[in-house]
Structures are given as C-alpha cells and as structure tokens.
Image: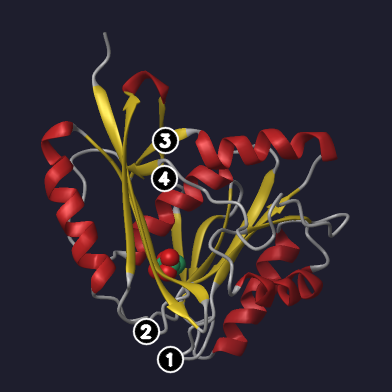
C-alpha cells in the first residue's frame, strides 16, 4: 500500500464593486506531518498580500495517492538581464520566433486578455483559437509542488513556484511554450518556458507597481487533443526536483 500525500490549495479574494477579485493563490503536495504547518503558512500568506487584504480565503485539503504522482526534473534555467520592459517584450518575441512561433506580436496582444483570469489562457498558436472551456476562469495548472521536504515559508517564492508550474506545463506534448508576467505589482521578472528553450527568466516585463499579469499556454496540435491537454494541466499530479 502506497503512502498517502495531501494536496493543499489556497485561494484568497476580495469583493470589489460586487465582483470577486483574485488576491493570491498557492498550492502544495505534502506528507501528513507537514499538513498543519502548511495550512497555517498559506493562511498567513493569504491575509498579508501586496494586492491588499482578502475577505475570502479558501483552503482545500485533499488526500491523494503517492502512486498517482509523477516525478520530473525541473527545466534548466537561464536568466536574460534587460533594462526596460520594452527590451523584455522584444526578448519574448525573439524567444517565440526561435521556438518556431512566427506570430509572436499577435500572441503578445492576447496577454491583456489574461489580466483578470484566475487561470491561464490556452491558445492554439496556429489557428489563434482560445481553447479554455471557461474564458473567465481560464485553465488552471494545478496539483504540483517541489519534490523533497520543500520550502515551507509563508511568503511566496515566485521563482520556485513558477519553475514547478512551468516544468509541469512544458511536459505536455502539445504545449510548445508558455509566457508569464507576474500579477504581483512588486514583481517585474517574468519568463518564457518550453521543452527546447528551458525556463528563461526575463528580468523586466512590466513597470514596477503595475498589477497586470497572467499566463498563456501555447498549444500546437489537433483540436481533438485539447481535452487531453486540459485534463493533464488540471489533474495530473506532479512533484518537480529543483
Ligand atoms: C507569479 O507571480 O506567480 C509569476 C511569477 C513569475 C516568476 C518569474 C521568475 O522569477 O522566474
């Protein structure tokens, strides 16, 4: 009989003008002995965030089978130092081009459509069709964490969490890249990630103080393959060795 693990997910939001606004979210996969500590730290993170105070916090704990969890090595990481957000955006376009995606300019225009989404946009780069069943929610890459005893700090480690997510996302055969800009107003580093290019950190993709951020998962394949891709992104459990 395998050891049980627990998936812990936190999301925090606030009502603004009758609309629920996302403040923060995080997730972990832990053994039972770390469960209480993790819940306390995620709660701490939820109520103290630079996007403001939450008035709704949801912490979901779910038992999962260790045998259902895939283990992967993290994508290799490189850093691209840029001085300005414009230079960062140019670098993104170059990376798309190098990845065989020749309509980078058009794709980057879709980024603004992600600002208010809780999940990511799933975009077919050849037809420019959006493939998310619910466009407001987007597709949520979940059920992943760092392998090992992990980092239990209550504050967010943007880089490690993003590397875990990007590794899981890039592992699907139909995903040929991911673009991410943080929605944290204090965090201007973003990235492009893919199987071929690895995880490329770009040190400035927006201006400090700007709350706009989001993700696009870049899909290439047959329309009939989208459902499997969404199921993988949302349900496959994965631990990533960093
Ligand atoms: C986020 O805020 O969730 C996105 C984080 C992007 C991290 C980029 C990096 O530091 O490598």
Mark 3 — residue? 238
Mark 4 — residue? 74
Mark 2 — residue? 186
Q: Position of 39 compared to 28: left or right?
A: left
Label 4's element? loop
Label 1's element? loop
**Cα separation between marks 4 and 1:** 30 Å
Q: Is residue 99 above or below residue 241?
A: below
Spot the residue most to the right.
127
**Cα separation between marks 4 and 3:** 11 Å
User: Which residue: 50% across, 43% down?
Assistant: 168
Whether residue 171 is visible: no
Q: Which mark is residue 105?
A: none
Mark 1 — residue? 209
Closer to the camera in the image, 230 or 83: 230
Q: Ligand 1 sits in which quadrant?
A: bottom left
Q: Position of 173 compared to 61: left or right?
A: right
Label 3's element? strand
């Amino acid at each position: 009989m395998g050891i049980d693990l627990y998936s812990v997910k936190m999301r925090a939001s606030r009502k603004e003008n009758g609309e629920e606004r996302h403040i923060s979210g995080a997730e972990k996969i832990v053994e039972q002995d770390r469960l209480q500590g993790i819940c306390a730290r995620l709660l701490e993170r939820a109520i103290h965030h630079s996007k403001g105070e939450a008035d709704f916090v949801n912490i979901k704990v779910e038992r999962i089978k260790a045998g259902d969890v895939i283990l992967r090595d993290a994508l290799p990481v490189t850093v691209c130092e840029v001085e300005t957000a414009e230079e960062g955006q140019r670098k993104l376009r170059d990376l798309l081009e190098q990845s065989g995606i020749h309509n980078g300019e058009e794709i980057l225009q879709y980024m603004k459509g992600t600002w208010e989404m809780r999940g990511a946009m799933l975009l077919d780069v050849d037809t420019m069709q959006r493939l998310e069943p619910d466009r407001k929610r987007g597709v949520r890459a979940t059920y992943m964490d760092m392998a090992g005893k992990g980092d239990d700090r209550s504050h967010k480690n943007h880089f490690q969490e993003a590397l875990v997510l990007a590794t899981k996302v890039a592992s699907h055969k139909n995903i040929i890249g991911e673009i991410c800009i943080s929605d944290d107003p204090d965090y201007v580093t973003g990235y492009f990630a893919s199987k071929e290019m690895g995880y490329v950190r770009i040190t400035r993709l927006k201006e400090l103080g700007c709350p706009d951020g989001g993700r696009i998962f870049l899909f290439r394949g047959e329309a009939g393959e989208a459902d499997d891709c969404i199921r993988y992104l949302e349900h496959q459990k994965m631990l990533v060795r960093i």
